[in-house]
Image (cartoon, rainbow, N blue to C red):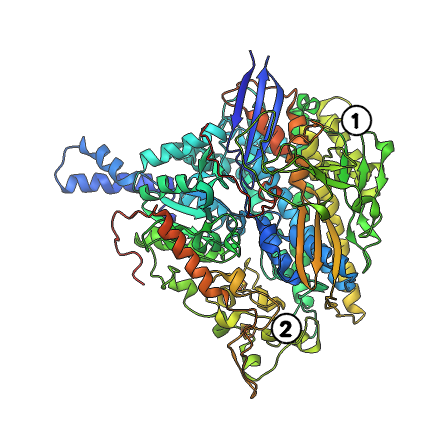
Amino acid sequence: MAKRIVVDPVTRIEGHLRIDAEVAGGRVRKAWSSGQMWRGIEVILQGRDPRDAWLFTQRICGVCTTVHAITSVRAVENALGLEVPINAQYIRNLVLALHALHDHIVHFYTLSALDWVDVVAALKADPARTAALAQGLSDWPNNGKSRFKAVKEKVQALVESGQLGPFAHGYWGHPAMTLPPEANLMAVSHYLEALDYQRKATQALGILGGKNPHVQNLAVGGVATAINPDNEATLNMDRLYQVRQLLEEVRAFVHQVYLPDVIAVGALYKDWLAHGAGVMNYLAVPDMPLDTAGTRFDLPGGTLFDGDLSTARAFKGFQDPYFRDNVAESIAHSWYEGDWTRHPFEEETVPHYTDFQDEGKYSWVKAPRFQGRPMQVGPLAQVLVGYALNHEPTRRYVDDALARVGTLAKTRVVPAALHSTPGRHLARAIRTAVISDLAVKHWELLVANIGRGDYAICNPPAFPLGEQRGFGFHEAPRGALSHWIVIRDGQIRNYQCVVPSTWNAGPRDGKGQPGPYEAALVGNPVADPERPLEVLRTIHSFDPCIACAVHMLDPSGRETVRVRVL
Amino acid sequence: MARDPQLDALNPKVTRRSFLKACTAAAAALGLADEAVPRLVEAAASPARPPVVWLHFQECTGCSEALLRASHPDIARLILDLVSLDYHETVMAAAGHQAEAALADTLKRHEGRFICVVEGGIPTKDGGVYCRIGGRTAMEILADVAPRSAAVIAIGNCAAFGGIQAARPNPTGAVGVRDLVADHSVVNVPGCPPNPVSFLGTVLHYLTFKRLPPTDHLGRPLFAYGRKIHDHCERRAHFDEGRFAEAFGDANHRRGYCLYKTGCKGPETYNSCPAVRFNDVGAWPVGVGHGCIGCSEPGFWDTMTPFYERLPGVAVPQGRGTVAAADRIGKGVFTVAAAAAGIHAAIGVGRKIWRSRSGGGEG
Ligand code: SF4
Ligand code: SF4
């Protein structure tokens, strides 16, 4: 007998997501992914000043905050044919790298670790043996017995207080929680330390961005971060070295804690390397531009299909028609009127809310497609595309990480194992390590350029009469993000965001092809339908972030339907 | 503030031990039998940490994210030692019906004693279909939870004033908490997002003094929103002397001159940014070189835009007089206020949520 599981709300994500799964014989047979909130920001943008758009779109998501900001200014610049000073590129690159470092650390520890780590079982661990385990994985200075003992006492106090707070009603003691107690204690300790290191990344970001979340230092045409080594009120050497120092500390955490932890979880849960692949078409866009026009990049992007590395094709730059012409969105199963698939410039959306219909419409999220095919985006796509395009740092980290998983798990692990639930976490940690190295490089590029006496930060925009169309992309932590803008007489006429979580969380399209979440869940084991831990594992591995996935609504033509309580 | 010994006493371990001692002494002094001690302990020590229910509605999670970056106290200390964060969708371990159970449990066990934090606006059009959690609309959840709490803190501009989704044309009829919960003692901690120090200051004030801090007429705590950005800005001397940056990156911008002409909204914005700064690194937007956008003011998405145009009605020094051209700026103020009032009257969900004012909201 098939059983229907409804997970609503899916927690430890940004936004409101509902997942339905049909389970038979202990496995998921069919799944539905449904976005449950809509705010209408793209409608609000209509008629406004394009220079302001980034401040609005940044508020699409407080998790992906700098991500929408950067993509938005790139879209307007693209529409105007405006290049930005090289200092502005480097500062933006540093900002987005620091953002990614923060975001990935938070994702693994705060948002996902509790799917794999049993906090309560950590109480059974011996701190001395935990230290031995941790020191075998890395020489992180905080991997000592006294630290683990203190953390164990902290957890003990929490449990005894009878107020577990955020840890209440977790899946403790679930049969799929199979880590040894020592690994659990190590992970809980690193969970707490991660809170410190994610903060350091945002401090460095704050120095450049004025504050964080929601940086306030961008502008169409560049950045507003004033550079002047001879002034105490601007970005000078003192502040730049503060950025450098914080960056180095975060980088050490990524290399010595985050990456080894993910390798250990991958090895200790090696059975899971067979679960959660789903859609094996991947899309990533290039980023960390090295010139003012966006034609050379430190991070590659492109597509690959059917999990076949030999199909890889690169995107060449901010103007590439291979990207511009091949993106479209379908609303066949989304709560909007009609049943079309259209290019973002041509989209026109009239909401039509109905109830959740298994075979009909069931989500506020649209279904983006590339050349008509569903694509998985995110760190796994970034890493596989980079690997296929022979990106040296990516290849080096992938080969090394897979070898370490193999040694710990006592089995050979090939790159194909990355098409899986733990594979997404591993790819994310690898990507974080690559970015942490590149951030140091871009800090050096910025400092060298300032040293040449170049303090230029912004080319002010001018808006001609008539219509301009532009698109901007950015390889966000969650995957390829693009904004599409139509400007008329200096005002926004149409604005569309095709975002990572729309690619991944979208519903079926007109041809019935499921989105990546839906496809990845099929075949997933579910030991106890009352406590669908395994469903969360796979969904969380994508790093869902739903507010941004939910699109525009025209205020007219709405039908009022009240939701039926489940 | 974080190292205050009073707050250390909130640590569950310390609390239990010191309470035991204090209760035994009290029992002896009152001449009570030993059997009374456990009951005294129970009454005094429970709940050890004030429970917090954090509701997410139409939001971007930026306010929660801001808390992750807090350092006085830091997030681990906040959730492990100071409060019991019983429901918070972004960090809680439970999901689905277990998450619902966590909420129901707290409402039952701590009725009238938990702090309710609201993040995000509340859509009111079409019965509120634009935001649902576990099948209930944001409006239904707020109407259920807020009246049973001891205190409501609206964090961020969205929960305080409707925020970005309430910007023209407000397609979902988004409003802030005070538009629905008809008691003006709800504390607003606006900002987009607010400085975590403003939020934590409010919570610590409540934990320490057992009442909410005094507020202004918009419900904002005076300790954080009592003064204008412009009055504490490090660039104010340049403003007063008529020294302005005209464009980002020009020579005056590189000298750190006033940003008024590039659109700074500091002269009309109440917040503590120049004094408190962000992320513990002394940074804030104006300090870095970008104008204030007025994020702690109601309706700022309409009243303060376009962000790169000058704020009208400001007397500019150096004989240039008041800038009068209010062409696109400023006219939204009245529409926003009127729309909010209309929605409030139409829904009438309003309900007195306070058990007693107990000294809160005296401003
Ligand atoms: S206008 Fe802005 S930058 Fe200038 S003094 Fe006032 S707050 Fe500071
Ligand atoms: S400077 Fe202005 S816009 Fe920036 S955070 Fe402070 S109040 Fe908000």
Q: Secondary structure at mark 2?
A: loop
Element marked by disc 1: loop
Q: Residue at x 30, y 56 (%)?
A: B360
Q: Is residue B2 visible?
A: no
Q: Nearer the viewer, residue A465 or A440?
A: A465
Question: In this orientation, does residue B139 appear?
Answer: yes
Residue where numbered disc 2 is placed: A232
Image quadrant assignment for residue A307:
top right
The residue tagged 1 is: A414
- List x then y, in percent, for residue A171: 50, 26
Q: Which quarter of the rendered picture does the C terminus of chain B lie within?
A: bottom left
- In the displayed structure, A227 sits above or below A513; it is below
In the shown orientation, is residue A401 left or right of residue A10? Answer: right
Q: Amino acid at mark 2?
A: Glu
**Residue B91: x percent and y percent?**
51, 39
The three-letter code of the residue at mark 1 reads Val
Q: CA distance from mark 2 to mark 1?
A: 52 Å
- Image quadrant holding the N terminus of chain B, namely bottom left
Residue A274, position as x, y percentages in the image? 70, 22
In the rendered image, residue A542, in percent from the top left (x then y), is placed at 65, 35
